[in-house]
Image: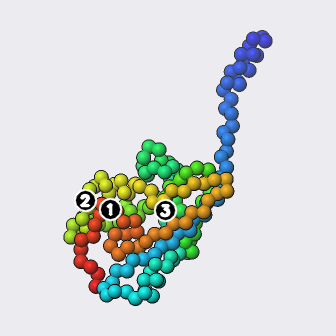
Amino acid sequence: MKKSITALASIFLFTMQTPKKVEKKYAVNFAITYTESYCMGMRPTEQILKELSTPKQYPNRELSIIKGNGNFNSMKSVFVGKILTDKNGFAKLNLQEGVYSIIDNEKAAFYSKVKNDTIDYKITSEACVQDWIKRPIFTFTVTKKGANVKFQFNKSCYLGENASQCISYIGPQRP
């Protein structure tokens, strides 16, 4: 009887799972801004150039967050979530300590828009474009103090916010 109880106790102890340790999450604050390129006709005034180069808050901007500093969809990257900036260009997310990357989903949307437009755009390599789409635009580290992430886009005239070396605009200049 004593051997049976010892055997049952041993089986019970081996089958018990240890409770998983809950990893603490820390506040990550995002501040997203943008500047603009001058695209229209005659030489701009200094005032116009200054206004275009002054960072502006970027409302309603959606970005994906992955764990790690590799390409999105790579074996080592793990999708964590999305952020959407508020009307002031801010967003907040709680994340565990570690290295994270921001992926811009707009790159794929821009490519879909221009890939068949051979009159205005030249694409040097499909592989180059796919690498560009998956490549993070920014990497940051979350510590026990959290993180404050500031990122600025530049809205270019013809090549989107994250221009690719694989896509060239060859169409006419805007008037």
Residue occupying image coordinates x 63% and y 53%: 143
Residue marked by disc 3: 63
Q: Residue furthest left?
A: 119
Query: Label 2 sits on what residue type?
Result: Thr
Q: Is residue 85 visible?
A: no
Along the viewing direction, whichever of 42 and 101 lies nearer the viewer: 42
Residue marked by disc 2: 124
Callouts 3 and 1 close, C-beta under 8 Å: no
Cα–Cα gap, marks 2 and 1: 9 Å
Corner quadrant of residue 3:
top right
Of the residues tagged 3 and 1, which is closer to the observer?
A: 1
Residue occupying image coordinates x 65% and y 46%: 23
Cα–Cα gap, marks 3 and 1: 21 Å
Q: In x, y percent, where is residue 44?
A: 37, 86
Which circle's residue, 3 or 2, is located before the other in the chain? 3
Q: In x, y percent, where is residue 82?
A: 52, 59
Cα–Cα gap, marks 3 and 2: 26 Å
Of the residues tagged 3 and 2, which is closer to the observer?
A: 2
Residue occupying image coordinates x 55% and y 51%: 99
Corner quadrant of residue 27:
bottom right
Residue occupying image coordinates x 45% and y 88%: 47
Query: Label 3 sits on what residue type?
Result: Leu
Residue marked by disc 1: 165
Disc 1 secondary structure class? loop
Query: Where's the C terminus, which quadrant?
Result: bottom left
In the shown orientation, is residue 11 left or right of residue 93? right
Query: Label 1 sits on what residue type?
Result: Gln
